[in-house]
Every structure is written in structure tokens, then in C-alpha cells.
Image (cartoon, rainbow, N blue to C red):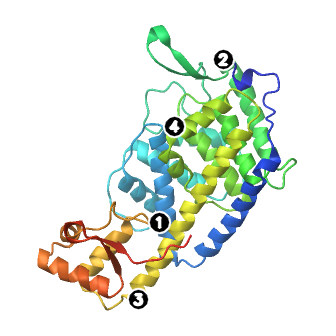
């Protein structure tokens, strides 16, 4: 197998710009709509959106690499970072480290990328690790992704040898800063971010954490394209179909004509943007519903509605059942039946199904 970095044209990627023009236009339009909707949120909901999206991104970008963290711990750490009220729960070094990275990533994004930035991110990401030979520095040994038994190993990817890493990363950092908006050779937003991700992953400069840092690099590129953090659920969308992500990346690692990769990347970012747009609309509709129901609910009903909103736009899997209501409020079954029927009558909930299959959903209209 010949890898992209072994080809004579490396790292001069080629692609068909016209095939990406529609996606680039949709991205610019979508970010404008998102920013407009975001302005309708109050400060509390903006804080919640930031913690929810960044927390989920921290969780999912780790899950993609097979590391499973605690969502509530991540959100608690993020709330402390942003100076918001939280509990005193203890978080693990891995959770604290990825939270540090995400906060750093979503800070002001006008600055250029540097080796020191990447080293800092790696130190954050590997906080508490004692098994690595090099933390906060580029690797000093070869890297290959393999599978199968020893007598029949399959090589999925092989990175450049360690003696080339420093030189390759010098080139990558120069390219990233030269291709930024307003720089010498600016590229369209999705094209640049997708290329940055592939370029970084092809070098695989660190002993561990390359996937997470590579996705952080692409999100930084997207943020630079319109001057502020994106809050796009990129890793969340990738995690839904990891095999497609690794398949597209693996195919792109073998050549330097990358139209297929950039098309996949663009579709993923646009889906992530749509997810965030839906979340913002969800928070707006939440505020409208709670205002409409102010003074018309008993404490049990209010507690249940707030708990349902915590589940986000997708809600409880299959909808809220009477058993869920009883578990949340500690009400008796007759009381739960009356409370739920009352919420339906007042327009707070919509009911589907019958008898044991009856389920309840928030009565909100998500049009995005």
C-alpha cells in the first residue's frame, strides 16, 4: 500500500472546487441563520447551550476513540470553567483534560495555530496519563494502525517515520495559517477545515490523541471562517456513524485527490450545523412553552416538564410514559394520570398511543 504522504505530489492536495460550492454556500447561510437564532436566547439559555454542546462534543470526540467519559462530570467541569453554578463533584483527569481542551478551543479564535498550541492541547488531552513516552511533544517512534492476528496482520494506515514529523508539522502549521481568512492564500471554510483534518491525521504527529486533536484543528478552522466559536456538533454527528468516518478517512489516506473526502466532510459539518440549529430552536420553544404555562402547573407537573427538557430535542426514547412520570415526581398512579391528562388539555404535552402504549411528548414545533 502506498500512502498519500509517500506520493511525489504530497502535500499538494487536489479537488474539484465546483462540486463543493453548494455546500460552502449552505454552510455560510446556515451559520448566519444559527447566529440570528442564537441572539434570541437569554443569557441563561446561551450558557446552557454552550455547556450542552461543548460537553457533548467532549464526550463524543472521546467515544469515537473508544474512551467513555461521564457526561455530568464533563458538564460540571465546563460550568466551573465558565464561572457558572455547579456542584462539587470530583472529575477524573481524563474528563478534566478534555474539558480544558474544549474550553481552550472555544475561546477567541482569531489567533494563528502554532506548535505550542498543539503541544498544549496534547498535554490537556493526556492529563493523568503515565503510559506515554512523550506528552506535549511530537512522537519519536513509528505509528501504524493494524488489525488481525500476528500471522495475518492488516495495515489500515501507516504514518510518516518519526524523523519526518517535525518537518511535516512545520509545513502543516505554515499551510494552516497561510490558508486562513484574510491570509495569503485563503480557502473556503469547509474546504479548509476538511483539508486540515486530513492533512493532520495523515501526519499523525502525536503518540496518542491524534483523532481528537485533528477534529479540534478542523473546528478551529471553521471558527476562524466566521470570527467566533462555532458550537457545531461535529463529533456528535460523526459518532453516529463511526464506520463511515473511518472509511472516508482511510480511503483519503491513500491518495492526494480528495474530492470524495471533502464531500463527506462537508455533508457531516452541515448535518452538525443542522443539529445545533435544532437545539437552539428547541431552547427558544422551551422558553415559550414555560412562559405559556407559568402559574398553570402544580410542582409535580413543572418538575416533569423541566426533566423532559433536559433530554434535549430528541426527548425520552419512545416518549414519556406514566411510569416515567411516577419515577420523576413520586406521584401515585391516579395522580400521574390526572396530571398528564391536564398537561395534554393545556397544550403542554401531546399524547400518542393507547393504554399501556400511551406516550407523551413536549408540544413544541421544531421547524428547522
Q: Quadrant of the N terminus?
A: top right
Query: In this rendering, which labeled residue sits more in front, label 2 or label 1?
Result: 2
Identify the mark nearer the N-term, 4 or 3.
4
How many residues crowd mark 1 within 10 Å: few (<14), some (14–19), many (20+)?
few
As helix, strand or loop, the secondary structure at mark 4 comes to: helix
Residue at image x 42%, y 83%?
Answer: 289
Identify the mark nearer the N-term, 1 or 3.
1
Identify the mark nearer the N-term, 2 or 1.
2
> Marks 2 and 4, Cα distance to the nearest angstrom?
21 Å
> Marks 4 and 3, Cα distance to the nearest angstrom?
44 Å
> Could you say where residue 250 lies in the image, as x and y percent from the top left?
61, 30
Q: Is residue 366 above or below residue 247?
A: below
Residue at image x 60%, y 60%?
Answer: 273
Give the labeled residue for mark 4.
243
Total numbered circles:
4
Give the labeled residue for mark 1.
83
Q: Which mark is residue 292?
A: 3
Residue at image x 44%, y 77%?
Answer: 364
Q: Is residue 300 above or below residue 168?
A: below
Is residue 73 toward the left or the right of residue 186 in the image? left
Query: In this rendering, which labeled residue sits more in front, label 4 or label 3?
Result: 4
How many residues crowd mark 4 within 10 Å: few (<14), some (14–19), many (20+)?
few
> Could you say where residue 204 lies in the image, as x and y percent from the top left?
62, 30
Identify the mark nearer the N-term, 4 or 1.
1
Amino acid at each position: 500500500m502506498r500512502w498519500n504522504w509517500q506520493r511525489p505530489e504530497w502535500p499538494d492536495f487536489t479537488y474539484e472546487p465546483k462540486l463543493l460550492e453548494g455546500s460552502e454556500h449552505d454552510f455560510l447561510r446556515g451559520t448566519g441563520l444559527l447566529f440570528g437564532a442564537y441572539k434570541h436566547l437569554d443569557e441563561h439559555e446561551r450558557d446552557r447551550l454552550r455547556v450542552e454542546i461543548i460537553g457533548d462534543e467532549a464526550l463524543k470526540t472521546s467515544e469515537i476513540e473508544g474512551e467513555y467519559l461521564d457526561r455530568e462530570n464533563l458538564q460540571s467541569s465546563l460550568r466551573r470553567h465558565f464561572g457558572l453554578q455547579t456542584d462539587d463533584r470530583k472529575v477524573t483527569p481524563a474528563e478534566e483534560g478534555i474539558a480544558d481542551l474544549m474550553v481552550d478551543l472555544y475561546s477567541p479564535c482569531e489567533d494563528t495555530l502554532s506548535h505550542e498550541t498543539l503541544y498544549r492541547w496534547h498535554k490537556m488531552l493526556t492529563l493523568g496519563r503515565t503510559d506515554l513516552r512523550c506528552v506535549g511533544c511530537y512522537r519519536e517512534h513509528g505509528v501504524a494502525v493494524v488489525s488481525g492476528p500476528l500471522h495475518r496482520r492488516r495495515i489500515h494506515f501507516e504514518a510518516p517515520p518519526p524523523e519526518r514529523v517535525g518537518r511535516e508539522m512545520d509545513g502543516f502549521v505554515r499551510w494552516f495559517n497561510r490558508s486562513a481568512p484574510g491570509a495569503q492564500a485563503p480557502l473556503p471554510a469547509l474546504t479548509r477545515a476538511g483539508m486540515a483534518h486530513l492533512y493532520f491525521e495523515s501526519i499523525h504527529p502525536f503518540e496518542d490523541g491524534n483523532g481528537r486533536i485533528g477534529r479540534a484543528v478542523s473546528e478551529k478552522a471553521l471558527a476562524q471562517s466566521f470570527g467566533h466559536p462555532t458550537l457545531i456538533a461535529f463529533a456528535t454527528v460523526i459518532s453516529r456513524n463511526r464506520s463511515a468516518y473511518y472509511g472516508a478517512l482511510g480511503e483519503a489516506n491513500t491518495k492526494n485527490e480528495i474530492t470524495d473526502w471533502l464531500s463527506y466532510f462537508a455533508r457531516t459539518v452541515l448535518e452538525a450545523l443542522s443539529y445545533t440549529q435544532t437545539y437552539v430552536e428547541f431552547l427558544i420553544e422551551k422558553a415559550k412553552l414555560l412562559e405559556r404555562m407559568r402559574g398553570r402547573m402544580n410542582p409535580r407537573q413543572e418538575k416533569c416538564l423541566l426533566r423532559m427538557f433536559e433530554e434535549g430535542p430528541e426527548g425520552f426514547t419512545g416518549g414519556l410514559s406514566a411510569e416515567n412520570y411516577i419515577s420523576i415526581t413520586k406521584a401515585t398512579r391516579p395522580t400521574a394520570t390526572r396530571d398528564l391528562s391536564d398537561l395534554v388539555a393545556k397544550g403542554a404535552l401531546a399524547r400518542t398511543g393507547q393504554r399501556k402504549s400511551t406516550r407523551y411528548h413536549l408540544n413544541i414545533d421544531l421547524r428547522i
